[in-house]
Amino acid sequence: MHHVRSALVVAACLGMAAGCSTKNDLPGGGTEAGTGGTSGSGGGTASAGNGATGGTQTNTTGGTSGTGGSAGAAIRGGAGGAPGASGSGGVPAASGAGGAGARGGGGAVGGAPAAGAGGSTLMGGAGAGAGAGGAAGVGGTTTLVEDQSADCVVGEVPDSSTLTKQITKLPDPFTKLDGTRVASTADWHCRRAEIRAQAEKYVFGAKPKPDLVSGTVSDKSVSVHVEAKGKAIDFSVSVVLPSTGHAPYPVLINVGTSGSLTLGESRITDQGVAVIYYNNYDLGKEGTAMASRGKPNAGKYYDIYGGTDQAGLLMAWAWGASRLLDVLQQSGTSLFDLTGVGVTGCSRFGKGAFVIGVFDDRIALTIPQEPSTGGDPALRIMDKLSGAERTDYNYNGLNWLSDNFAPFVYANDTSNVVKLPIDTHALIGVIAPRGLLVLENPHQTQMGAPAGYMATVAGSEIYKALGVEQNVSYHSDVADTAHCSYKTEYTDMLVQSLSAFLKHSGAPPGKIVVGADGSLDESDWVDWDAPTLN
């Protein structure tokens, strides 16, 4: 990590600017597949690797298919296995079963997916190793996964009324619900499921699963149809294709309508990346500032699940984004590269982008900009930073967070968020090993850039434990400019991140660049060490 400091000038937030969150307003790389068994006479079982290149599959002349090797279980990104070369000679007597690959992410760009006939690979970057077997070089299908930890059984998440212990520093994200500590990547795979469950129960509200999703995709728009609980909704998003590159295009989803992309539409499309404008207000509409809490929410999400559903607006927006991704996935890869999908937004839309990235593993790169409370900044620190948007300002402003968060809201000169067993650094860990680029502006003190800095530093310990520390970056060393304006200082990191995670080309930035007075002392907030995960 590189820590760079420069001068800091404090300025106030522009309050009512579009997307502003104010007091008044309130991967590249495949999985760690081991070497696949060689087809021919009895392929061997694959062994788990550590980010190493997956095995090349070959077919011996006239040989019979071997049994597919099992995929490595670890989730560190490594180079994917190259497709098997065709054998010169006889046809295999029977196709062997390809080993199922685990989801990859992060790391360098891997090879094309390779699996035995009938084998499958879960969402990886460009390449997920699978077992040998079947006709050599026959790729398995690539399946995008909304929640890669859905196979985990999560124990009972304690009711908030039982959480009496005060944890003043950022809680140890490696401590599981049962009190034991994560010791392996397999442990972390299910610990992240626990963190998601805790975040739903205590902060954002549950993310329900629909009964049916369908839609259409064109070079101008995407239509989404969703059915659940006997009801149906429809919404659409607009598409802007780049004038450079070719289909399938990587794509950046902007939370907000056309014109709200703070990073700049041409700056994105010039990189050969398409832009989707996702009108999150279709799914959940904000009410009257400082007068919405306790009243039913409006929007198409709530048309299905009811205005008093526990999901706050941020979760409603995340749910809608996932349904959009469902349709993109159903459409295939003729127009969009579904392994190169990112999400971004600024201020309240930055909160939305962060939550979308946390709760959908199909997002390869998450770029929250100046989101304040509800985004990446650590909640405990926001309650302590002078001039920052405390949890009560945010919670009582608009219904971004769930009613479930009520027991943790700052009240009577007391920060109650210290009772929360997680914080946003743990949510950053849920994004791992996928790409994360946090963009902050320390001159807007209300937005709490130092809290975002410390959450990212603590969250990067999880990336480090997974061997993908380079996949998380943070930048707040910027000139004194307006809230939700583009900072030219971001450009190098932005372009590198788009290339690495959306275009699968080159290495990510892997840097933490912080302006003067924008950092905090890590020892004041972190009293745990990351384990070495096998």
Image (tube, helix red, strand yellow):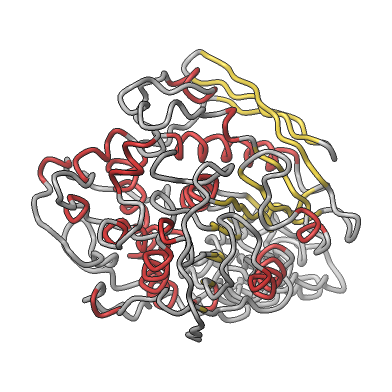
- The quadrant in which residue 273 appears is bottom right
Q: What is the x, y in percent for residue 402? A: 34, 36
Residue 336 is at least partly visible in this image:
yes
Residue 387, horizontal then vertical, whole percent: 34, 58
Asked whether the viewer can see residue 41, the reply is no
Residue that sits furthest to the top in the current view: 230
Of residues 270 and 386, the one drawn nearer to the viewer in this rendering: 386
Residue 12 falls left or right of residue 158:
right
Residue at x 49% of width, y 19% of height: 304
* 391 or 239: nearer the viewer: 391
Which sits in the foreground, 258 or 17? 17
Which residue is pictured at 54% across the width and 80% down the height?
511
Q: Is residue 171 left or right of residue 481?
A: left
Residue 242: horizontal and vertical position, in percent?
A: 85, 54
Query: Where residue 487 sits in the image (x, y, percent)?
Result: 64, 66
Q: As displayed, is residue 209 above or below residue 329?
A: above
Residue name at image x 23 percent, y 60 percent? 176
